[in-house]
Image (cartoon, rainbow, N blue to C red):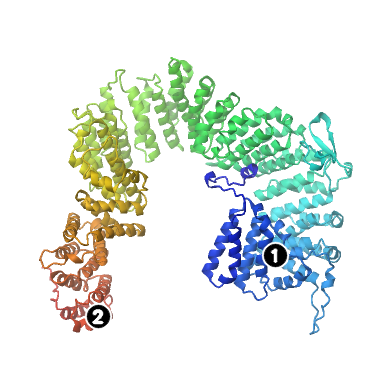
Amino acid sequence: MAANMTGDGKDDGADESKLQVHETFTELEEVKELIRGLENIYEDFIEMERSAERFRFIIDDYQEQPHLIDPYLEELMLMLLNIAKQPKAPRPLTRQAFSYLYLITKMRGFKQVVRLLPHEVSDMEPLLSLIESQNPTDYELWETRYMLLLWLSIVCMIPFDLKRLDSNLQQGDGSVKMRTMDRIMAIGKMYLSVNDKVRDAAAYLVSRFLTRLDVKQELLPSILDWMMKILKDADHQTVLGCNQLCGVLATSALLFKHGKREDLLQYAPIVLQVALEAKLELCDSCVVRKMMGKLIHRLGLTFLKSRVAAWRYQRGSRSLAANLGGGVVKSTEGGSSDVIQGPEEEDEDDDVPEEIEEVIEHLLVYLKDKETIVRWTAAKGIGRVTGRLPQELADDVVGSVLELFSSQETNGAWHGGCLALAELGRRGLLLPGRLKDVVPVIMKALAYDERRGNFSVGAHVRDAACYVCWAFARAYEPKEILPYVNQIASCLIIASVFDREVNVRRAAAAAFQENVGRQGTFPHGIDILTTVDYFAVGNRVRCFTELSVFIANFPEYTQAVIDHLAEVKLAHWDSAIRELSAQALHNLTPCSPDYMAATVLPKLLPLTSGLDLFQRHGAILAVAEILHALYPISQARKKSLVDLLDENSLEEVQSVSKKLQDAKMFKRHGGEYMRTAVCCLIEKCSLSKLPFHNKPVIELWQSVIDECLTHIEPEIQAAAVAAIPSFFSEYFTRPDGSVLQDKQESILSHYLQELKSSNEPTRQGHSLALGALPRAMLQGQLSRVMAGLIAVSEVTQKEEKMAEARRDAVKALSGICETVGVANDGKADSVLCSANVATVYSALLQAIKDYTLDSRGDIGAWVREASMQALHDVTSLIVRSDPQMLTPDICKRVFCSLVQQAVEKIDRTRSLAGHLFSKLIYHSPTVPHIPQEKEVKDVFPEVLAKGTNWSAVSDTYTMFSRLLALDEYTYNVLLGLVISVGGLTESVVKFSSASLLEYLKSLSGDRAALERFMGVYLAVCRDHHRDDRVSLPAMKALDHMLCWGVLDTLASDKSDSIPDQLVSHIRSEVTKCGNPQKIMAAADVYCGLLQFEGSPRSKCLTQLMILLCHKYPRVRKTTADKVYEALLTYDEVVPEEQVSDVMSVLSETSWDNLEIAEIREKRNSLCDMLGIKRPVLLKQS
C-alpha cells in the first residue's frame, strides 16, 4: 500500500541504493537480437534457456516503468508474431516466441497489448485453426494458448458480419462445418474451465465476443442460460467446480462491464437472483468469492443509470475542458467544493431499483471477507455503486460502512471498512459533513492491534488506515481537514515511527508526506519530512531511538509521542518493541523531564506489579530508563534525583522487586521477563545513585542477581552481569571508594565456590560475574579470582564438554585485566603486572589449543575465539600502558597462535584470527617483539591488511601461506594448513591446497629448503602422534603432496632419509589403529611413497601387503584398488615379467568377499612375485 501511495512502485523492503529509474528502453537492440536469434538456437536447449533468462531479466527490469517500451511495442510484437505464425515452424520455436509475447504482455498489461495485435479478416481462419489444434491440458504451452485467445479477442471484433466467413460450410464428404461464431464460442467455453491463466483470456474473449451485434442477437440468451446453469449446478467444493465458477463469474462480470446497459438490463435481475442463490460467499476459494463480488457490483451498476452524482464533493476541477471554460463551475453551499454541471445531468429523483439494496448488502458482507483481494474488490464496488446513488441513499451506505468499525467485528471488517472509506473519499462521495464521524474511526484504525496470545493481527488494518489518510489528502480542500489536522498528524507520525511493521511505517510516512504536500497545514510538516521520510523509517531501531527524539523536539508532537509509548507500546506483545519503547522514553526524557517525572512515572509505577505480563515487563523497563535519564538532568539543575521525584514514587521504585517476589512472579509464567527487567531496574537505579544504601532492598536485589547468574538462559545471565558493576560500585563501596570488606569476602567466596559447580550455566554466569566486578571489589583479591577463572578455563576429563563455561571464563579473565589496569611494578593482588602477566598469557595461550568435539561439532572453537579476542585485548591494553611487560617469547607465541588459527578450516574462526592479526601488526602504539616484523609487514601491507575480507578463503590462504617461508611461523602455519588441506569442505580444501602447492613449487630447486619443510612436517606429525584431529588430515595432505610430484628431489640412499622417516611415522600411526578412514589414508600415502626406490619402496610394499589381509573388507578392497593404480603409475616397481600376473591377481580377486585364508594365499603369491618377504601373523601370547 505504501508503494502505491508514493507512486514509485518500490517494495517495502527494497534497498533504495539498488533501485533504478530508467530514462528510456535502452536494451531495445539486445531484445531484437534475442528475438532474431530464436530461429538459430531453437534446437539448442541450453542456448534457449540462456536466451529466455536474459529476455525475462530485461523485461522484468521495466516492470515498474512499462510505458518506456510503448514506442517499440508494436515492432517487437510483430517480430514475434511473424515467427509464431509460420505454418511449419517447429514447436520449440513457436513456444518460445509466444513465451516472449506473454512476458511483454505481463509487463505492459494485456489491455495495451491486445489493441496492437493484427486484426484483419484474413487472420480469423488461421488463428481459429491454430487454437483448435492446441491441447488444453499441455501445461508447457499455456503462454501460447493465452496469447492466442487474447489475439482472438481482438480479431473476433472485426466489423463484418461473421456469416460472410461461413460460405463453405458444406464439406466434400457431406459433413457440415461449424460456423465461425460457434467455433469461437466453443473455444471460449472449453477454456473457461481450465486451471491456469488461459481462463482469464477466455473470459475476456467471450465477454467481448458477446457484445457484437450479430452474436448478441443470436447467442447471448443461450450463453447466459448456460452460465446460469453452471452457477446453479457447479460444486464449489471440487477443483473442477471452482474452475468453472471462476470462468463463468469472470465472464459475466466482464460482460456486464463491456456490454451496453440497454441490452443487458433485462437479464440483470435473473443473473443476480441465480448468483445470490448459489451462496458462493460460503465457498473456500477466495478467487470465486472475488469474482462473485465483481459480478454483483457490475450488476448493481447495470441497474443504475450511468451518471455523475451532482452532489459529490470535488476538490477544484479535474476536467481540462472545464478548466478551459467548457463547463460552468458552480460553487455549492458553503463554498466547500465545486461541482461541474453538465448539460446531460440526470434527475436524482429517479427510482432506485429494489435490487440495489441486495447488491449493497452483499458487498458489505464481502467487505468483511477473510481475504484481502475479496475485500478490495468489494470496496471498489461500493465506491462505484455509491457514485450512482442519490445523496440520501449514498449517506446510508456510508453509515453502513462506518458500522463495520465495531469492537465486535473482525480485523477483516476493519480492513474492508478502511478500503471502502478510502474509495468513497477518493471519488468525492464522502462529504465533508461526515468527516466528524470518519476521522475518529480512522484514528482508531491507525492504532488497531488485536492481540492473540503471544502475537497480534492488525498490520493490514493500520496499513489501510494510512491509505485512507493518503486518499483524504488528495480528496479534500485544506479547510475541510483543518479541524482534524493535529489529530491526523500526530497519529500518522506515531505510526510512521513506532509501528512494528516496516510496511505500515512506510505507508504512514507516505500518507504524512502526501498530506504535507497537498494540505500544507500539518505542523512543521516540511521540517519533519526532510528527516522522517519513506526510507528513513525502514530501520526500526533508528525510528525508536533517533527519529522519535527529532519529532518530540516539536512541541505539538512531544506529549503525543510520549503518551503513545507509555500507554500503548510498553504493553506490546513483542518484547523487542517493549525494550525499544523503554529506550525511546529514556531518549525522550530530556524533551519533557518534568512531564516524565510528574505524570508518566507515577502512571507507570502501579503497572509494575499489574496482572498483564507484557505491560508489567514494559513498565519496569520504562521506569528504569526514565530514572536513568532523569539523573543527569537533576545533576545539571544542581539537584538530587530525589528532588525531582515525589516521596511516594521513590517508595514504589524501592518496592517493585519485593512485590514481584511476594507474588512469586519470578517463578511463574513470564518469570524470565521479570528477571531481566528487574536486573535492568537494579542497574539503572545504581547508575542514578538512588539513596537505598543499607536498606533491605539491597539484599533483595543481590539475591535476584545471584539467582539470575545460575539461570539457563544467556539473556538473563547477561542482564544480571550488566547490573553488577554499577550495583556493587554504588551500594557496596564507601564514599572514599574503598569496598566493604565483609561484602567483598562473602561475594567472592560465593562466586568462586560456584565456579566449581557441576552445572555448566552456573559456571558460565559466575565466571561472567567475576569478569564484571568493579575494581574496588578486586583490590587485594586479584590473584585469587584469576586462579579461580584459570582453573575453569582449563580442559579436564571430567568437564571436557563444558566449552561454554571455559569460553566465559576466558572472557572474564580478559575483562578483569581491563578493569584493574596495568602497572609493571604493581602488586599481583591488585593490578596486571610483571608478576602475573605470564600467568594470564599462559592461560589464554592454553585456551587457544582447545579442540574439544561433541555432538554439536567443534565446540572448542568457542573457546579459541574467546581466547584470540582476549589475547588481542590484553596485548593492546599492555602496549598502551607499559610495552616492556611483553617478552619476546610471549609475543612469538601470541602471533604464531593467531597465524595458526588464520589457516584452519572454520570460516568464522579464521576470519576473526585474520582480523586480529592484522590489527596487532599495525597496532598503535606498536607491539614490540613481533617475530620477523619486517618480513611479515612485507607480506601484509597495511592497506591490504585492513581491506582484506578475512572470511574469504581465496584471500586468507593466499596471504598466510607465504609465512611458510619465515622460520618463526613455519610450524604453526603448516599445522593449520595441513588440517585445512586434509579437510572435507570443498572450498577450503581447494584454496588451501592451491596455496600449499604454490609454496612447494617455489622450493622445487632448493633441496635443502624442501628437506627443512618436510622436517617441520614430521615434527608436526610427531607432536600430534595418534591425535586423529591432526594425523588424519596430515596424511591426506601428504598424499596430495606426493601426487603433485613436488617431493621427487627427496630421494636418497641414506637409511634415515625423509621418505624412510615418513614410512616409519605412518606405520607407527596406524599400528593397532581401528579407524578405517585413517588406515585407508595410510594406504594412499604408502602408494605415493612407492615412487622412492630402495628401502622406502620395499617397506611400503610390505605394509600394503599387510593391509591386503586387514580384518576390514573395505580396507582390503580399497588397498587393492590403490595398489593397482600405483603399479600403473610407477611401472618400475614390479619386475617386467611379473606385471601381468600381479595385475591379474589384484583386479580379479574379490578382496572384500573371500575368506581370509584364501585372501592370505593370494596375498602371499603377490609377495613372491614382488620379491618381498611374506608377512607372518604373530600369535598373541
Per the image, label 1 sits on a secondary structure element best described as loop
Q: Which residue is mark 2?
A: 1143
**Mark 2 surroundings: few (<14), some (14-19) or many (≥20) residues within 10 A:** some
Identified at 23% across, 36% down, the residue is 788
**Is residue 453 at all visible to an observer of this figure?**
no
Where in the figure is residue 1001, as x and y percent of width and height?
Answer: 25, 61
Choose mark 1 or mark 2, whichever is in front: 2
Say what amino acid the circle numbered 2 marks: Met
Residue found at the far front of this picture: 29
Per the image, label 2 sits on a secondary structure element best described as helix
Please name whichever residue, 387 or 413, is drawn nearer the observer in this view of the structure: 387
- How many labels were placed on the picture? 2
Say what amino acid the circle numbered 1 marks: Ser
User: With respect to residue 414, does 588 lie above or below?
Assistant: above
**Is residue 571 at all visible to an observer of this figure?**
yes
Please name whichever residue, 348 or 926, is drawn nearer the observer in this view of the structure: 926
Q: Which residue is mark 1?
A: 193
